[in-house]
Image: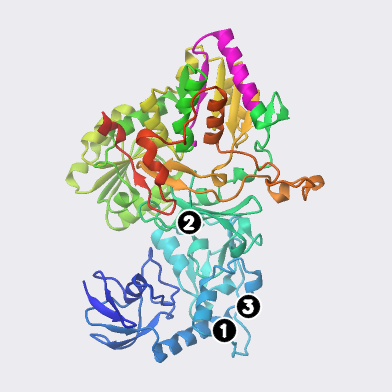
């Protein structure tokens, strides 16, 4: 490992690390635009200049392009280096519009930060600014080409990293243009990352345009609920309204990026029709009154239809806190059936997956990126785990062959990210044994539990994509407590009362159930059919935990308080005429707290918290950490 000195600080850098990265490792920030940890070096912006005072290289150099070498003496504060950086910033600002007051990037703009840091503050150029015509890039991304500083980050991500082909760089010299040949929606399923990766305001989130400044945001570390990958995100809210979602770095999960579905998916949190008031037979009431009515009616159902006539149903979008308490709720109301999902086939596949996965054979996204062969079995990653598709592309770029196995692995999924793949009919046709680091990605939607045995014998690491953000955690609890799929419970014909806790049950399954109650924050079919509705807090309104596809438990934090967004308030009650601590609709609790209240009202012993026993270690998870892998729990305990 080479040893060098940067601004009189001794630094020991890893082999191949640039001077810029070595400086960053000891807290020295060198201005930069084109360099990005995920994209590497480009040497395009010329603003990372430093002076080499001694060693194998001397003079002014670009720190992002220069590997750290033994004996180097580097100065980031030398007058020559400082002057060059100031001049480069001044060149960039010659044509940059002075529109910070109306730019959505204001307050989180690298160009702002480094312009101030480099000491440039006065425009000396008196000529006209160069101007460009913006493009319409679809409903999600706004394009302001006049703000571009030609750092090439956008095109390097879009074409090289994400494999997109409908966006690039055109022109030359002072007429360089980043965009499409003609206006139109960007086709890449990862195009939203242009918003995060652009160091200026060329690409901004159109869905939250002109809504707030960085210092106005309510933000907290969170986990995406869109699929089982568990990408780390930072939701942005203001006035109890979710404005937008940005990627949050976690090198063990999603790296720096997220998919467009997780970023731009319809934000049901803001839906005016979502349940916000407890209802009994359609009449508004308090939460405790609704819980009393629910327990009373469940007692009537049990008395009328007998033992085993009540079912408690959770889902894979229910946080691990709520999923852990579901068996206690079922026991407190003498339920005859406990369900964590609807489909029997999906449940069998999930059960087979958790019984097979161990700490040794389970695959993470990092394993996928570093694989030397990848087989995608019965899965369309565009729907089941888009970020795994991006990881597959990184492995393919390094030379790994990609195999699509089964009729439910369409070729279109890899074409969308520029991957060339081979299609096979059966897993036995995949020559995994000849590779050193093969990985199989298997979907649960069409999975056959018998295939899990084949995967277990293959010698490859396996990534099983569970349904929902907490599918892995729900499957573990289902096996632990003997849960059965709702389809199976209803087929027995005994279920006459059903309590749905954040469960998306289709109307046809509810048709033959006389009594339905729902605890949810979405307006689902169960909510519409329920005699008793108790609203719960959405994932951005509470703390919680999800267990992702690889068995990594990750904590998410509350971003905003529950309550009606200000823009949705009735004019008659805005501002509220009653002095109160909570905003209108702000007394909503997370589902796990509602369940604890119900257990207490049922006369049972109330747990101290959602986690106990073998799950108690999840209480101390750090929301800003990498999470804790708990996969293989079933196999180790058996």
Q: Which corner quadrant of the image does residue 534 belong to?
A: top right
Tell me the distance, in whole angstroms, between the alpha carbons under discs 1 and 2: 31 Å
Tell me the distance, in whole angstroms, between the alpha carbons under discs 1 and 3: 10 Å
Residue 310, magenta (yes or no) = yes
Q: Nearer the viewer, mark 1 or mark 2?
A: 2
Check the image and tell me how it is coloured: rainbow
Q: What is the x, y in percent for residue 452?
A: 29, 32
Q: Nearer the viewer, mark 1 or mark 3?
A: 3
Residues drawn in magenta: 290-318
Q: Is residue 512 visible?
A: no
Rendered image: mark on residue 94 = 1
Instruction: Determine contact: label 1, label 2, CB under 8 Å.
Output: no
Q: Which is nearer the N-term, disc 1 or disc 2? A: 1
Element type where label 2 sits in the image: strand
Element type where label 1 sits in the image: helix
Task: Locate the C terminus by quadrant.
Answer: top left
Q: Is residue 266 visible?
A: yes
Read off the residue under disc 3: 98
Residue drawn at (57%, 71%) of the image: 145
Instruction: Determine contact: label 1, label 3, CB under 8 Å.
Output: no
Residue drawn at (54%, 73%) of the image: 148
Q: Residues within 10 Å of mark 2 (few under 14, many from 20)?
A: many
Read off the residue under disc 2: 247
Tell me the distance, in whole angstroms, between the alpha carbons under discs 2 and 3: 28 Å
């Amino acid at each position: 490992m080479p040893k060098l000195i940067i601004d009189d600080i001794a630094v020991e850098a890893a082999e191949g690390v640039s001077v810029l990265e070595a400086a960053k490792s000891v807290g020295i920030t060198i201005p930069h635009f084109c360099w990005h940890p995920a994209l590497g070096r480009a040497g395009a912006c010329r603003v990372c200049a430093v002076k080499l005072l001694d060693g194998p290289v001397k003079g002014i150099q670009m720190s992002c392009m220069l590997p750290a070498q033994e004996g180097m003496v580097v100065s980031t504060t030398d007058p020559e280096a400082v002057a060059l950086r100031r001049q480069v910033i001044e060149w960039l600002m010659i044509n940059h519009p002075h529109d910070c007051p109306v730019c959505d990037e204001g307050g989180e703009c690298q160009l702002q930060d480094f312009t101030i840091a480099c000491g440039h503050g006065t425009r000396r150029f008196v000529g006209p600014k160069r101007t460009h015509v913006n493009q319409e890039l679809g409903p999600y991304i706004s394009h302001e080409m006049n703000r571009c500083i030609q750092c090439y980050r956008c095109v390097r991500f879009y074409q090289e990293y994400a494999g997109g082909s409908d966006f690039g760089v055109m022109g030359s010299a002072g007429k360089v243009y980043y965009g499409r040949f003609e206006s139109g929606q960007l086709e890449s399923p990862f195009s939203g990352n242009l918003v995060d990766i652009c160091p200026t305001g060329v690409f901004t989130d159109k869905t939250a345009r002109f809504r707030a400044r960085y210092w106005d945001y309510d933000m907290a570390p969170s986990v995406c609920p869109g699929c089982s990958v568990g990408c780390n995100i930072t939701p942005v809210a203001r006035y109890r309204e979710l404005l937008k979602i940005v990627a949050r770095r976690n090198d063990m999960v999603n790296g720096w990026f997220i998919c467009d579905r997780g970023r731009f998916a319809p934000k049901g949190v803001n839906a005016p029709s979502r349940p916000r008031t407890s209802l009994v037979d359609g009449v508004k009431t308090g939460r405790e009154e609704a819980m009393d009515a629910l327990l009373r009616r469940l007692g009537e159902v049990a008395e009328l239809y007998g033992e085993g006539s009540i079912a408690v149903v959770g889902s894979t979008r229910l946080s691990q806190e709520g999923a852990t308490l579901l068996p206690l709720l079922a026991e407190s109301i003498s339920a005859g059936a406990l369900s964590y999902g609807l489909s029997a086939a999906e449940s069998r596949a999930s059960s087979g997956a958790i019984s097979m996965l161990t700490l040794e054979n389970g695959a993470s996204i990092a394993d996928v990126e570093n694989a030397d062969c990848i087989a995608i079995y019965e899965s369309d990653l565009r729907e089941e785990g888009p970020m795994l598709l991006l990881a597959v592309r990184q492995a393919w770029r390094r030379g790994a062959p990609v195999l699509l196995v089964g009729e439910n692995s369409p070729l279109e999924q890899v074409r969308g990210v520029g991957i060339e793949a081979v299609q096979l009919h059966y897993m036995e046709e995949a020559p995994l044994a000849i590779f050193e680091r093969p990985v199989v990605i298997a979907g649960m939607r069409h999975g056959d539990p018998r295939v899990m045995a084949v995967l277990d014998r293959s010698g490859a690491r396996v990534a099983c994509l569970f349904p929902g953000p907490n599918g892995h955690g729900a499957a573990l609890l289902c096996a632990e407590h003997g849960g059965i799929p709702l389809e199976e419970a209803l087929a027995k014909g005994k279920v006459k009362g059903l309590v749905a806790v954040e469960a998306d049950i289709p109307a046809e399954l509810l048709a033959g159930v006389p009594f339905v109650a729902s605890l949810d924050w979405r307006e689902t079919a169960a909510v519409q059919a329920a005699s008793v509705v108790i609203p719960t807090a959405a994932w951005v309104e509470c703390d919680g935990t999800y267990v992702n596809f690889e068995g990594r438990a990750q904590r998410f934090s509350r971003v905003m308080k529950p309550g009606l967004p200000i823009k949705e308030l009735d004019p008659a009650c805005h501002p509220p005429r009653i002095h109160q601590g909570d905003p209108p609709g702000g007394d909503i609790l997370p589902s796990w707290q509602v369940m604890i209240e119900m257990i207490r009202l049922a006369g049972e012993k109330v747990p101290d918290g959602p986690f106990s026993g073998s799950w108690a270690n999840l209480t101390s998870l750090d929301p800003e950490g990498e999470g804790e892998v708990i996969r293989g729990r079933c196999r180790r305990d058996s």
